[in-house]
């Protein structure tokens, strides 16, 4: 067991969206728990003082959509390296998707993931179990068993549940456990063999496109099924303007739907694919500027509840090849804060509190886990961000085992510099401890 720490964070700007707090002040951690926060909390002599003046102290970030690749593809990422990448990105909790090899469709694998994460000790790892056995889209998994083992939600992510009757059954079943179904919304009959967004750019490049409708039809279907069953549905990686509008209307009529998007969908467009750049290949694909604007609007007005990275490590073997053959997905854990600061805060005028709500408080609420706040009594899961630090992601400064990122070499301003998990510093860029 890690020894819990007692210390005093001094002179930071502290933001807690849940308590609606934003002030310059101090924070006292005792035995791994937050004991006091406020402008007037006073240090006592026997406690270690950590001077974080000029920096931002926020609740530990939570990424509800990550691929850790273990078991089965440890050459891309392991639970250990993924947890370290998460800590370096400011995350104290991540939810990992079940499409490993074998997939996480039984309690043995769920327990294995929890155990590996505990040994590495860098980040809370919350397994998402598969909805169907073997992710084959047919028979349901043992939800109760998987929840007992530590599963926090259910998804066949990587693949949709194509049969609507199976999805309906899964939603009905989820009600018995008050658990969450996460929808990877994709109509495979429309997206098959597609390599990028369908439109002018795909035509010019001679690549088969994936129409926005392939996502929107599936988003609408799963929302209607949630409405039919009264169950909760969470829409993963929203990428199109049409999906945002479908979710907005569903929320307005009271459907129990939440949704996430990823940093690449609000910062990049299909233009990145020009030159057949496989680092811009993902599923769903990067869309148009109009879609990007709609995603930002959705984040602004609360239609989209969360930012999740969809961290998807692949080796250079799977990316340095013909575009059509290249694997889908990019890593995102270590660039998410930088991209959020640049696009949402600096360009679009979001407040820091809004960004932290999208990256911590809302994911905690959706997953039904503790976290996302700095209220006294909570685990001291804390992220310290230097909004002025220069940061250029590169192969040699990322902790992930893979480096498939379209942001490599791009100059950013702002990054996490200290991540504290249960009072223990797990990432300490500047040697505070
Ligand atoms: Zn997915």
Image (tube, helix red, strand yellow):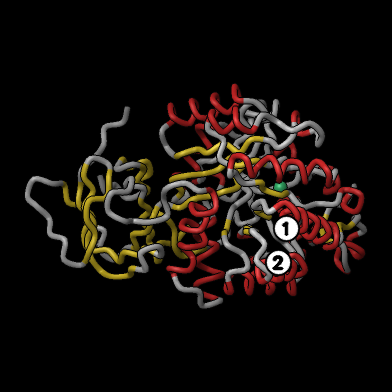
> As displayed, is residue 188 above or below residue 220?
above
Question: Residue 388: horizontal and vertical position, in percent?
Answer: 39, 66
The residue that mark 1 highlights is 227
Q: Quick one: label 2, few (<14), some, or many (20+) residues within 10 Å?
A: some
Image coordinates for residue 108, horizontal then vertical, percent: 59, 22
- Taking the image as drawn, is residue 140 in sight? yes
Which of the two residues, 261 or 391, is positioned nearer the viewer here? Answer: 261
Question: What is the x, y in percent for residue 116?
Answer: 50, 27
- State which quadrant residue 109 falls in: top right
* SS assignment at label 1: helix
Residue at left 50%, top 41%?
399
| SS for callout 2 | helix
Q: How far across and how far down the image is residue 86, in percent? A: 49, 44
User: Pointer 1 and pointer 2: residues touching (CB < 8 Å)?
Assistant: yes
Name the image quarter holding residue 156. top right
Residue 271 makes an appearance in the image: no
Query: In the visual, does 23 lie left or right of 349?
Result: left
Q: How many labels does the image show?
A: 2
**Badge number at residue 250:** 2
Q: Does the residue labelled 1 lie within 8 Å of ligand 1?
A: no
């Amino acid at each position: 067991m890690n020894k819990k720490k007692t210390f005093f964070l001094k002179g930071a700007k502290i933001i807690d969206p849940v308590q609606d707090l934003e002030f310059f002040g101090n924070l006292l951690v005792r035995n791994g728990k937050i004991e006091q926060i406020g402008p007037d909390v006073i240090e006592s002599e026997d406690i270690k003082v950590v001077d974080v003046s000029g920096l931002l102290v926020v609740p530990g970030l939570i990424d509800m959509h990550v691929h850790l690749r273990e078991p089965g593809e440890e050459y891309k990422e392991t639970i250990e390296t993924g947890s370290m990448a998460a800590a370096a990105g400011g995350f104290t909790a991540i939810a990992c998707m079940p499409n490993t090899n074998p997939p996480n469709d039984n309690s043995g694998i769920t327990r294995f993931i929890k155990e590996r994460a505990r040994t590495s000790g860098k980040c809370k790892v919350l397994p998402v179990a598969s909805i169907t056995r073997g992710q084959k889209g047919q028979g349901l998994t043992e939800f109760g068993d998987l929840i007992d083992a530590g599963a926090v939600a259910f998804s066949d992510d990587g693949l949709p549940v194509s049969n609507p009757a199976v999805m309906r059954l899964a939603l009905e079943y989820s009600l018995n456990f008050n658990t969450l179904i996460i929808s990877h919304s994709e109509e495979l009959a429309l997206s098959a063999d597609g390599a990028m967004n369908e439109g002018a750019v795909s035509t010019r490049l001679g690549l088969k496109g994936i129409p926005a409708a392939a996502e929107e039809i599936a988003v609408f279907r799963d929302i209607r099924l949630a409405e039919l069953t009264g169950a909760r549905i969470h829409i993963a990686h929203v990428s199109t303007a049409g999906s945002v509008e479908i979710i907005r209307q569903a929320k307005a009529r009271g459907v129990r739907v939440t949704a996430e998007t990823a940093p690449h969908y609000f910062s990049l467009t299909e233009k990145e694919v020009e030159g057949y750049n496989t680092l811009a290949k993902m599923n769903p694909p990067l869309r148009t500027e109009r879609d990007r604007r709609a995603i930002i609007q959705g984040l602004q007005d609360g239609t989209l509840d969360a930012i999740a990275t969809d961290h998807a490590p692949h080796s250079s073997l799977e990316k340095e090849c013909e575009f059509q053959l290249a694997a889908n997905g990019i890593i995102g854990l270590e660039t998410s804060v930088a991209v959020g600061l640049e696009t949402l805060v600096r360009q679009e005028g979001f407040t820091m509190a809004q960004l932290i709500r999208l990256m911590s408080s809302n994911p905690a609420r959706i997953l039904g886990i503790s976290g996302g706040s700095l209220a006294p009594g909570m685990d001291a899961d804390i992220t310290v961000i230097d909004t002025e630090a220069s940061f250029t992601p590169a192969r040699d400064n990322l902790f992930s085992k893979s480096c498939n990122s379209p942001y490599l070499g791009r100059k950013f301003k702002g990054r996490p510099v200290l991540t504290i998990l249960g009072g223990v510093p797990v990432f300490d860029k500047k040697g505070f401890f």
